[in-house]
Amino acid sequence: MERRQCIELMYPELEDKVVVTIMGASAQELYDLGHRDNFFYLQHAMGLASSVGMGLALHRPDEKVVVLDGDGSVLMNLGTFATMARYAPKNLVQVIFDNGSLLSTGGFASHTTSGDTDLAGIARAAGIRRVADTDQLMPFGEAILEAFEEDGPHVVVARVKAVGPDNYGMDLHLPENAFRFARYLSGRRGDS
């Protein structure tokens, strides 16, 4: 299965959710489907999408928060699993696209390539109870629907091929994305 297929499958369901993506392929493929102001593409901060997503989930318990992450980024910030288990935000869904590669930073093999490092196993060992792990699109879709409908936190590990997007070229720059995202959040709360 490919990351692009997974993102396409989720895309219609992301319209009313707060979405944070890590840099690179996940961000580009989501953007290519059509930008929405509830999408925040966390560029130049590898490893921190899960932390930003958790902070949003804790601060905005009325919103479903979805983090689109990668294996390389998660490996840079494994402590997030323990923090996620401790605070257990019911509205947090972390989707990890595990392609065994640091695709966005040169395509180097990640620690998951050998099969010795199991991100779903690490999440479970940290105390996260709702963890799914699949390399098939249908079970991925089922796990996502469950995560979107039921209390979490949820971690969904999607083992995908190491295939990148056709291009890297967003015309939405980080300051503008941050402004639109903040305005979206403010409007959802009814703040002015």
Image (tube, rainbow, N blue to C red):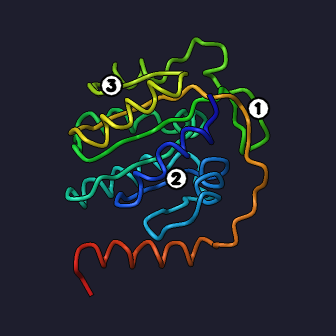
- Image position of 146 (left or right of 134): left
- Image position of 59 (left or right of 135): left
Quadrant the N terminus occupies: top right
CA gap between label 2 and label 1 equals: 20 Å
Q: Secondary structure at mark 1?
A: strand
Quadrant the C terminus occupies: bottom left
Q: Secondary structure at mark 2?
A: strand
Residue 84, picture quadrant? top left
Task: Determine crowd level at label 2: few under 14, some 14-19, many 20+ residues with C-alpha closer than 10 A.
Answer: many
Residue located 64% across and 72% down the image: 172
Residue 101 position, x and y percent, is 69, 31
Residue 33 position, x and y percent, is 60, 57
Task: Determine crowd level at label 3: few under 14, some 14-19, many 20+ residues with C-alpha closer than 10 A.
Answer: some
Residue located 54% across and 32% down the image: 75
Residue for badge 3: 126
Q: Is residue 134 above or below residue 30?
A: above
Q: Earlier in the sequence, mark 2 or mark 3?
A: 2
Q: Amino acid at mark 1?
A: Phe
Q: Earlier in the sequence, mark 2 or mark 1?
A: 2
Q: Is residue 83 above or below residue 38?
A: above
Residue 107, picture quadrant? top right
Q: Amino acid at mark 2?
A: Thr
Q: Amino acid at mark 3?
A: Ala
Residue for badge 2: 21
Residue for badge 1: 108
